[in-house]
Amino acid sequence: MCTRNPILAALLVCVVALGAFASELDRLVSDIAGGDEQARAMARQLLPRHGVEAIPKLVPLLNHGDMAVSKAAFNVIEDLVNMAGAPGRFDDRLFATAEVMKLLQPGQPAEMKVKGMRLLPLIAPSTLDLEPLAVLLDDEELREKARACLQHIGSSNAAKILLEAVAGADPAFARALVDAAGRIEVPSGIEPLERVASEHTAPEVRAAALNALAWTGDPALIALFREVRGNADEANRIECERAAIRLAENMGRKGGNWQHTIGLYKEILSETEFDVITRAAMMGLGRFGDETVVEPVVAAAEGRSSAVQATVPPALEQLWGRAATRRILEVYPKLDTAMQLRMLEMFGRKDDPAYLPVLEEAAASDDPAFRAASLKALASSRSIDALPALVTIAREGSEAERALALEAASNVAGSLGTAGDAEAAGRAYLELFNLADDPAVRRTALEGLVRHPVADAYGVITDLLDDDVLSETAHTALPGLFGALVSAGDEDKALDVFDAVLCGGASPEMLVGMVSRLQGVHTALDTTKLLGVIKEWHIIGPFQWTSEDDWETAFVGEPDIDLEEVYTDGDAERRWKEVTTADALGMVNLIDVIGQHDHVFAYAYTEIEVPEATSAQIRLGSDDGNVVWLNGEKIWEHRVDRGSGVDQDIIPSQLEQGTNRILLKISQGAGGWNFMLRVTTPDGAAPW
């Protein structure tokens, strides 16, 4: 049949397509319910493409007797619900929510209601009528599931339903309801929770209400907390105090109520009988307090358990500022011996120079316990200021103390390195080396100097170059020592170290890097014979670069050139100039030789003598591109726009016995204009 109405034809096509789509949906749902595992897996993947319209067809399968079927159906619905909850899918969300809510209606099996309560938090809008869940809170079998569902939904409406159910619930479940409402943390729940806290007959529910209110951090609630705690029985008093601790914590975090925060912590500290609450209040005072909390924290530990006494140092460790440090140091001498020993370790962790005199005094004590505690404290310090005390112990202490002092010095050095203070770490490792007799400790110190070189280590490292045990590590330390000496401006020692590296058979790449550090330092270093650096050239230019074809233009008749010839570039005459660069790596600045130009070429020519024919490399760096001829043969071309660097282009070559002619063509786009060249053996050394 054919039709002459195109609109009708289009509608027919759509109807057919929709029918096909609907039939595919039914087939996939049948595959979920069927016995073919492979077909079920495929349907599991394809069904989400059909959107939320698939949910009603899948819902009957949630109660299927075959767990594989019910699980697959649930997983697809869960995917669809998650997709519908995405931003911008308002209609899909409403449709999916309505389908899920049907699972909670009276008459549905308990298993269906449970699955509905698992799905609802994924999609429920904040305005959703949650009355079906309110009904389930009265169901002995399902009430805990309903409570958890409401808590996960987390809306004001959910909190309202939870709190309305408190009055009719037994104390245990009422407590759970209050806890769930408190976790939702909505302002609308505050007033109902206050009523529960002040009016409910069960003390455990009142205590739970305090805990649920603590998130507010509202100092106006302190009176209510005080009242409920005062009326609590012994079993629930600790829960009330835990709630008060949480209230104080949230007050402190919110800020703006410092006096109320500190006052509440101090009140709890003075009245509680429970160690766990005492310790929490002490830590809270340290976290939010200032120098005024030092005495209350210390006093709270007097006569209490070892756990409470052990809380004093970490509580005070949180205090910062000169006033707090001064107050702690004023209190320290008044403490008993056990508390002083605890405080010493905290002083080390504070990493504050103000505590060093106390640590040094303890290190010099006649009491081994104080010396050991000071060593541990000094070891945890990241300050190089701790080293003098460690040096004293390492030189004058017992054998056991000496070992601890060396370990502590090593820890200080390592901590300084980890913290990024390389100079201080190097000095610490040098001090450690000078202290140590044990070869293992000396090796550790020397390895630290490899990582953190300092110029002052020159004598130590050079003296070890022939040492039977540490020679290899000392040689490894030389490049870093060289750099430290260059930075310190000590040219003579830097050159001595360079000679030691050179005699040790260092790679040319390492030597090039070391030479680059010497740039700007006046030396007589012959890098031509050492590294194959070419410093003497004949230069000519500029020649105008008007098109890419000019890369092939023989402006000087290359490759055969005449150094006496005069060339023209437009109306200008160009002559060869002799140039010798003083740069240690052979850089020739063509702007200095020729002048600042854009879009031009220059040529550079040199000759080198080698005693015999040999394989070689021409190592060239250029700003910008280059062409290279060797003995009249073009061996390299690199059309590039770049800044120069050492050995950017490495060109395998064959040198002839006697004179070898090298000609370069260097392009200039704009900006810098220079080149540097080394002629080396294949491993980077000079070939003569």
Image (tube, rainbow, N blue to C red):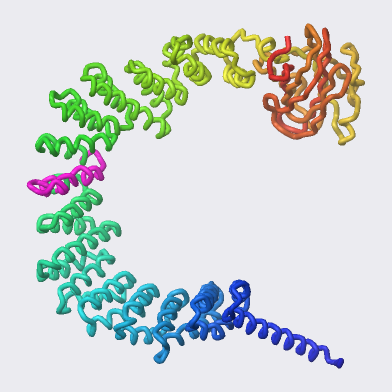
Q: Which residues are magenta?
A: 297-323
| Residue 485 image position (x, y, % from top left) | 49, 16
Relative to the observer, which residue lies in front, 88 or 372?
Answer: 372
Q: Which residue is painted at 13% across and 67% down in the image?
A: 235
Relative to the observer, which residue lies in front, 375 or 382?
Answer: 375
Left or right: 185 in relation to 168? right
| Residue 417 image position (x, y, % from top left) | 41, 30
| Residue 208 image position (x, y, % from top left) | 22, 71
Q: Is residue 159 magenta?
A: no
- The number of numbered badges drawn on the structure is 0
User: Is 66 situated above or below 430?
Assistant: below
Does any portion of residue 488 appear in the rendered image? Answer: no
User: Is 565 situated above or below 385?
Assistant: above
| Quadrant of res 575 | top right
Left or right: 50 in relation to 493? right
Q: Which residue is painted at 44% across and 83% down in the image?
A: 112
Does any portion of residue 413 appear in the rendered image? Answer: yes
Left or right: 512 in relation to 448? right
